Amino acid sequence: MSFRNASAILTRANRIKSKLQSSLEATVLDVDDVSYQHAGHAAMKDTSDKETHFNLKIVSPKFEGQSLVKRHRMVYDLLSDELQSGLHALSIVAKTPNEVTASAK
Amino acid sequence: MAAILFKGIAARSLTTRLTSSCYYGMKYSTKVSNDPDTHDDFKPANKLENSGTSLSNIIEQDVKDNPVMLYMKGVPDFPQCGFSSLAVKVLKQYDVPLSARNILEDPELKNAVKAFSHWPTFPQIFIKGEFVGGSDIILNMHQTGELKEKLKDIVSKQ
C-alpha cells in the first residue's frame, strides 16, 4: 500500500531511471529533465504535464550489435507507459560500453 | 447510393491533392479549397471519415514517392518544435528535395504515422522508403557521414 503510493509520487525522471536501469543494465544513465526548454511551444499549450522532455544518455551492453533505430526503439518500448501519460519527447544518446571506450582513445 | 457516390468523390479529390503536392514546403492541410477538382457541394465534412485504412496507404505512398519524407511539427520553413527544426536544418545541408507533412494539423495522421513506423515521437524521417528515425539519429548520421552516403544517389532539386 505505502509502496504503491510512493511510486505514484515518484517523479517521472525517477521512474524513467528505474525502468531503464533494470532492463538495460546501463553502466551510464543520465536522465536530464529539459521540459523547461519546451514549455509553451505549440504542441505543449494544451497540456498540464510538467515533465515532458528529457535528455537521456545511456551506455548499455544491451545495445551491442543494434542499429540506432533499434536502440531508440528499445528505450521507447521500455518507456511506453510514460509516453502514453504525458511524456512528450526524448533526446537519446545510446552507446555501448565498447563505443565509449573507443571514442575516449 | 448517394452516400457511396459522395465518398468516392471525396476520396478521389483527396488522392489528387496528395499526389500532386510534393516537394519542399508542401503543407498538409485539412482544407480542400485549392483543389480544382472539387466543389463546395462535394466538400467532405471531415476528409478522414472515409479513410480508416487509407491513411496508412497515404503514408506508404508518401514514403515511396518522396526520396526524403518528413513527418514533423510545423512545416520546413516554420517548424514548431525544436526537434523538427533540427531535423530540417540537418537535411537542408544536402541538396535534396524535402517533402513534409505537418502532423500538428491532423491528429489522425499523427497516430497513423506512429503506428506505421512503430515510433512514438516526431519528427520521423524516411529516406528512400526506409524509416531512418528521429532528429537524434539524423544528426548522428550527419556527423558520421552515413547520411551523405545515403542521400548521394538522390537527384538534387532544381
Image (cartoon, coloured by chain):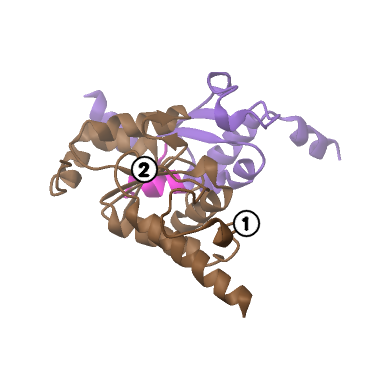
Chain colours: A purple, B brown
Dominant secondary structure of the magenta stretch?
helix
Q: Amino acid at mark 2?
A: Met
The image quadrant of residue B137 is top left
Q: Nearer the viewer, mark 2 or mark 1?
A: 1
Looking at the image, residue A58 lies above or below residue B6:
above
Q: Which residue is mark 1?
A: B45
Q: Nearer the viewer, residue A4 or B91?
A: B91
**Looking at the picture, how far across and down is residue B153, in whole percent?**
13, 49
Q: Amino acid at mark 1?
A: Ala
On whether residue A2 falls in the magenta region, the answer is no
Magenta highlight range: A59-73
Looking at the image, residue B119 lies above or below residue A14:
below
The image quadrant of residue B63 is bottom left
Q: Name the mark on residue B26.
A: 2
Chain letter of mark 1 equals B
B93 with respect to A52 (left or right): left
**Looking at the picture, how far across and down is residue A89, in whole percent?**
52, 35
**Looking at the picture, how far across and down is residue B51, in whole percent?**
54, 65
